[in-house]
Amino acid sequence: MTRDLFDATAMYDEDYLHFFASSGSGGAPTHGPLVGTAYTSTSAADLVWRLLDLEPGMSVLDLACGHGTLANHLAARGCRVTGLDSSTVFLDRARADAAAMGVEVDYLAGDMRGLPPWSDRFDRVVNWTTAFGYFDDATNRAVLGEMARVLRPGGRVAIDLDNLTRFLASYTPSRVTATLDNGDMLVDRHHFDPLTARFEVTRTVIRDGRARGLTFLKRLFGFPELRDWCEAAGFADVAGHGEDGSPLNAGHHRMVVTAALP
């Protein structure tokens, strides 16, 4: 384990669900300049199904599954899904939603930097909604190695990230990231460090008339860099797509990188 670059428990908590997973919240967040959420839960499942050639009965690891939206929808389509996340708050919500949907997902608490002894266990790995790039570069590379380790030969991975070109073109020093009808809001101040390619955010959470601050960061990637990292981790056939599944271009909000083990 390496030292965490920010306090993830302060970021991925009940407040996060309040703004991004409650009714009327507007859906999934964008963690930086306003580039669009790009997906509904159904369209994300459609895209993953298509890009990874999923079939009912396949074993799928949703790595950093969050509150389980994608994992639950893949399970509803017949996949055998395992969801792993470090946030117990998110996992509790994921289990409750799975029960409400009548689907079964094996939700586990864990750290993507050191997965359980699952070598060659999964047909597919999904890492969605900018859930990659939160550590130093050596550790981010090691996470890719963990993805490769738990996949069976011929297995495939899909990683959903911000499209660097569109993201930087939409850069703003600050913005109101989320607002609810009762006046609750998130206000973010942004800083991009070109020496580390890290996007740093200072966030103010205003809820029920009280305010608190937190910080978080993420690594931004261009496709050629992440392609090279994937190949170094043992993957082949690395490709980049936009949120519509077509080849990545500068206008896409999202960059979905797919790759396969030989």
Image: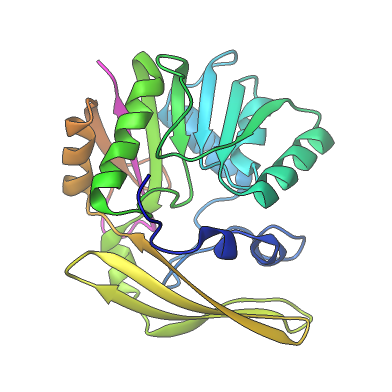
Q: Is residue 135 magenta?
A: no
- In this picture, residue 180 sits left or right of residue 242: right
Identified at 52% across, 24% down, the residue is 60
* Relative vertical location of residue 60 with respect to residue 27 in this rendering, above or below: above
Q: Quadrant of the C terminus?
A: top left
Q: Quadrant of residue 174?
A: bottom left
Depth order, front residue of 152/43:
152
Image quarter (top left, top right, bottom left or bottom right) of the N terminus? top left
Q: Position of residue 135 (x, y in %)?
A: 34, 53
Magenta segment: 249-262
- Residue 185 seen anywhere in this rendered image of the structure: yes
For image coordinates 56% across by 36% down, the residue present is 84
Identify the residue at image location x=59%, y=15%: 56
Q: Residue at x 51, y 42 (%)?
A: 64
Q: How is the image coloured?
A: rainbow
Count of numbered badges drawn on the protein: 0
Classify residue 172 by image quadrant.
bottom left
Above or below, 215 against 102 in this view is below
Q: Position of residue 130 (x, y in %)?
A: 43, 52
Q: Is residue 247 visible?
A: no
Foreground of the two, 121 or 156: 121
Q: Residue furthest bottom?
A: 209
Residue 157, horizontal then vertical, whole percent: 38, 30
